């Protein structure tokens, strides 16, 4: 089992920045691929990005590439989502998720990000 707790959400003006954190417990963190997802009102949950357990490489959705950066600190069992140049359309509940293998099996409770235009 893995427990995930997100933090760092809030209200920010368009063009601003936020950093989300996701603290993990319950399993060896370094062995997990860690993803970020988001869900806006009335829309389906969408993939934001992932940072892999091996090598720490990351991939991003086209809508956030170049603006968002995922990093991880294995010593702190924490993954981060740095969000810059925020837009109104980035408003959503953001979730982190853990994948021991190919599937995301564990999810956090989500944190609200609201970008005012």
Image: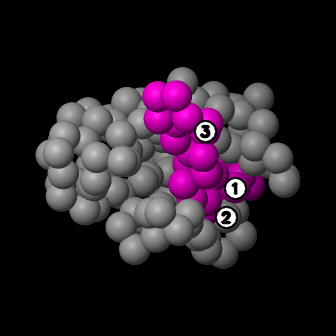
Counting other residues with Cα less than 10 Å from the Cα at mark 3, is it few (<14), some (14-19), or many (20 or more)?
some
Magenta-highlighted residues: 29-51
Furthest toward the top, the residue is 109
Q: Secondary structure at mark 2?
A: loop
Query: Tags 1 and 2 in contact by the CB under 8 Å rule?
Result: yes
What x and y, as percent, mark residue 33? 70, 55
Residue 58 can be seen, yes or no:
yes
Q: Nearer the viewer, residue 41 or 26?
A: 41
Q: Secondary structure at mark 1?
A: strand
Judge whether 68 appears above or below 104 on screen.
below
What x and y, as percent, mark residue 74? 55, 56
Q: Is residue 54 left or right of residue 9?
A: right
Q: Is residue 39 left or right of residue 117?
A: right
Q: Nearer the viewer, residue 98 or 55?
A: 98
C-alpha separation, residue under disc 3 versus residue under disc 2: 20 Å
Specify the label residue 45 is tagged with.
Answer: 3
Q: Earlier in the sequence, mark 1 or mark 2?
A: 1
C-alpha separation, residue under disc 1 versus residue under disc 3: 18 Å
Counting other residues with Cα less than 10 Å from the Cα at mark 2, is it few (<14), some (14-19), or many (20 or more)?
some
Q: Quadrant of residue 104?
A: top right
Judge whether 53 appears above or below 75 on screen.
below
Q: Is residue 42 magenta?
A: yes
| Residue at 37% in and 30% down | 112
| Residue at 56% in and 63% down | 61
Q: Is residue 83 magenta?
A: no
- Quickly name the residue at label 1: 33
| Residue at 66% in and 75% down | 55
Specify the label residue 52 is tagged with.
Answer: 2
Quadrant in the picture for the N terminus = top right
């Amino acid at each position: 089992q893995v427990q995930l707790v997100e933090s760092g959400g809030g209200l920010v003006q368009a063009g601003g920045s936020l950093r989300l954190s996701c603290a993990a417990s319950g399993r060896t963190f370094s062995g997990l691929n860690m993803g970020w997802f988001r869900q806006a009102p009335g829309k389906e949950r969408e993939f934001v990005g992932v940072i892999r357990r091996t090598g720490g490489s990351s991939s991003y959705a086209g809508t956030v590439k170049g603006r968002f950066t995922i990093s991880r600190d294995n010593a702190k069992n924490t993954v981060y989502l740095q969000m810059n140049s925020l837009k109104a359309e980035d408003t959503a509940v953001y979730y982190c998720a853990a994948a021991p293998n190919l599937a995301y099996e564990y999810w956090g409770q989500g944190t609200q990000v609201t970008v005012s235009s």
